[in-house]
Amino acid sequence: ALGNATRIIPFIKNEDKTYLATMTLGAVSDTLDAWGQISYTGQTRYQEKDLRDILKEFTGNIKQIPPMYSAVHHQGQRLYELARQGITVSREEREVAIYSIDLLDIDNKLDLPAVKIRIDCSKGTYVRTLCHDIGQRLGTGAILSNLIRIRSGDFAIEQSCTLEELLHTTNIEEHLLGIDYPITLIPALSIESPDDIDAILNGRMIKTSTKLPDGIVRVYANNYQLLALAVSTGSSEQSVIKPERVFK
């Protein structure tokens, strides 16, 4: 996000995610991925049907224990800071939502089997933990060996560009999305009165007869310029609009 667009980040940070992940069977590690201290279980035999059934078991609302190598706080310290000191502490389970797990590919020709999956999940899901838990359930052990986030909310990897492309572009705006692109599901209000527009831009409340749900709304000038994200409260007859984030 650039400029004023940084001000909408608090309103989009809880978006769902989609990942492409590869988990390697027959191994475990202290970080739950291929970049930690790896131990080999010696167990690489499994039935594909069992794997498919287990993936279904991990679909829905599930409990996860955050890995020690994570940014979760424990008594004022990050877990990874403790882990680097060789300290392991008890962590509370957290509920996350796994909307779907699709089995995309299995490569049994490598030294250790590699399973590629696509995961649609809620914010806060640890894919490393998911792979580890699947491996434990399968009886082989598993580590995350590759991960690509291909979607975060309304943003898809197809819309991204490389740093190299940005460094050599002659028009950076052609790579930018509109400031309101990721918040289009938030209800919108358009105002035309110059007095109302001035009030919103200066952080003052206005009233409107437009029926709006209570909560966050987008406020536009003449259905075009995004003026603010505001809080709407009121009755069926009238809503009070109080600006929260103003975009001048």
Image (spheres, rainbow, N blue to C red):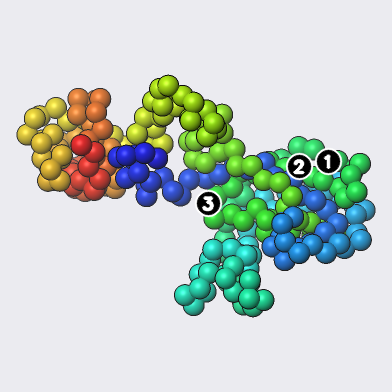
Element at label 3: loop
First along the sequence among labels 1 and 3: 1
First along the sequence among labels 2 and 3: 2
Q: Which of the two residues, 91 or 7, is positioned nearer the viewer here?
A: 7
Measure how far apart labels 2 and 3 are at the Cα level: 21 Å
Q: Residue at x 48, y 45 (%)?
A: 15
Quadrant containing the C terminus is top left
User: Is 215 placed left or right of 204 in the picture?
Assistant: right
User: Is 87 placed left or right of 71 in the picture?
Assistant: right
Residue 121, percent from left and from top = 59, 47
Residue 115 quadrant: top right
First along the sequence among labels 1 and 2: 1
Task: Rate crowding at label 3 as few (under 14), some (14 to 19) or many (20 or more) other CA atoms within 10 Å.
Answer: some
Residue 113, percent from left and from top = 86, 47
Residue under circle 3? 123
97 up-or-down from 236: above or below: below
Q: Residue furthest left?
A: 195
Disc 2 marks a residue whose amino acid type is: Lys
Residue under circle 1? 106
Q: Which mark is residue 236?
A: none
Residue under circle 2? 116
Task: Rate crowding at label 2 as few (under 14), some (14 to 19) or many (20 or more) other CA atoms within 10 Å.
Answer: many
Q: Residue at x 71, y 46 (%)?
A: 146
Q: Which of the two residues, 171 or 111, is positioned nearer the viewer here?
A: 171
